[in-house]
Image: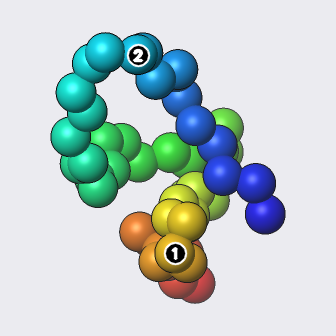
Amino acid sequence: MDIITFGDKEDGKEYILRPAVYCLMFNSGKDELAIIQTGDGKLFFQVVG
């Protein structure tokens, strides 16, 4: 599974690791929720039902 990365890291800047989720993503029918998986396999959401 590929891990999606947003943006590019800029040389000379200090970055802080901030494991977090900023939104909930639903499909257009609003009956499915996205599941986000980190590189170490942790899941942020579980779809139930």
Decide: is 35 above or below 18: below
Q: Reply above or below: 15 against 42.
A: above
- Dot 1: within a 10 Å radius of its alpha carbon, few (fewer than 14), some, or many (20 or more) residues? few
Q: Give neighbour class at mark 2: few <14, some 14-19, many 20+ (Cα, 10 Å).
A: few
Left or right, residue 24 beside residue 40: left
Residue 34 image point, x, y percent = 58, 56
Q: Earlier in the sequence, mark 1 or mark 2?
A: 2
The residue at the point 36 percent across, 42 percent down is 23
Residues 15 and 34: in front is 15
Q: Residue at x 52, y 21 (%)?
A: 7
| Numbered tag placed on residue 40 in the rendering | 1
Q: Which residue is drawn at the image coordinates 25% and 33% (left, top)?
A: 15
Which sits in the foreground, 21 or 10? 10
Residue type of the residue flagged with mark 2: Asp
Toward the front, the furthest residue is 12
Q: Is residue 31 visible?
A: no
| Quarter of the image that includes the C terminus | bottom right
Q: CA distance from mark 1 to mark 2?
A: 25 Å
Q: Which mark is residue 11?
A: 2
Left or right position of 21 against 14: right
Q: Is residue 38 visible?
A: yes
Q: Give the total number of marks visible in the rendering.
A: 2
- State the image coordinates of residue 41 (x, y, percent, origin top left): 55, 78
Foreground label between 1 and 2: 2
